[in-house]
Image (cartoon, rainbow, N blue to C red):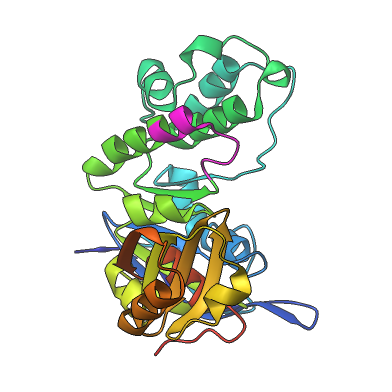
Amino acid sequence: MAEAFRLTGLVKRFGQLRAVDGVSVTVRTGEVVALLGPNGAGKSTTIDLLLGLAPPDEGDVRVLDGGPRAALDSGRLAAMVQNGFLLRDVTPAELVELHRSMFRNPLSVKEIYDRAGIGEFAKRRCGKLSGGQLQRVRYALALTGDPEILVLDEPTAALDVDARRAFWASMREFTAGGRTVLFATHYLAEAEDYADRVVLMRQGKVVADGPVAEVRANVSGRVLRAVVPGASDDGLAALAGVASVRRQGDRAELSCADSDLAIRALLDTFPQASSIEITSAGLEEAFLALTSSQGALR
């Protein structure tokens, strides 16, 4: 499979801060890749380097068969950024027409409207639109040139549940033809559900890169969930085999170094516990473990 883009040894400094510190990632054509990490991990700076919005201090960016600027100018690479500015007195319809005029073979207006779901408010001025509607307009503009590679920075921020579901349905259609997507998100469930692969960053470095199942496998242990009336965080944390505790009301979630030991201790100490389930560590647990200050791959 051909390469969509390659980042090699990227370094970006801001004063004494190395916002991106030796990032190397290769994404192949047709992959859907989630870029994850806590605030300050270097995700947005990495995206800026990929798009040619900032030059790397060290390293190289290759997009398709050249640099990012050529890919952007040709429409083969496009981006949707979370806080992209939209003129308040211009309508989405006018913006779409303007963007279509920049490309040799743009998508039709109807296809853009249908994919992004902006038809019902396309003639309304952007200053009158909600945050979620503005996100859909940004998505529409990113689709205009029918790009081969689409880069999305927090694409479903400000979208409600139904709009988020519709967005990912549209994205499935977009990628069905072999297009490549890189998206940064704080919604880990989206990464788990829609990405072929996840790249986790911490302090400017890549700390994990691979399919969701492979990244999850880097975190040992299991998660025990149960309803435990009257239990305290301290009481649950003291159970043998339990590494950490999260609790909401009577519902407890125990990360376990030894789940067999933990469930025996739970039932001995809290015989009233019910609705018990044990699962492998999920992407959220892997994310927390691998991006914490002590997090590291096994």
Residue 100 lies, in percent from the top left, at 47, 26
Q: Residue at x 26, y 54 (%)?
A: 30
Q: Report the residue that reaches farthest toward the left.
A: 1
Span of residues in magenta? 155-165
In this rendering, is residue 105 above or below 10?
above
Q: Residue at x 64, y 78 (%)?
A: 57
Q: For the C terminus, which image quadrant?
A: bottom left
Residue 255's image quarter? Answer: bottom left
Residue 4 lies, in percent from the top left, at 33, 60
User: Is residue 51 in sight in this rendering?
Assistant: yes
Q: In this view, does 155 lie to the left or right of 194?
A: right
In this rendering, is residue 155 above or below 260?
above
* Total numbered labels: 0
Q: In this view, does 224 lie to the left or right of 184?
A: left
Residue 31's image quarter? Answer: bottom left
Residue 272 lies, in percent from the top left, at 42, 61
In this rendering, is residue 101 above or below 3?
above
> Who is closer to the viewer here, 117 or 144?
117
User: Is residue 59 in sight in this rendering?
Assistant: no
Residue 194 lies, in percent from the top left, at 33, 50
Q: Which residue is drawn at 40% across and 80% down?
A: 265
Q: Residue at x 46, y 53 (%)?
A: 183
In this rendering, is residue 78 above or below 211?
above
Q: Does the magenta stretch include residue 297?
A: no
Q: Report the residue that reaches farthest toward the right.
A: 15
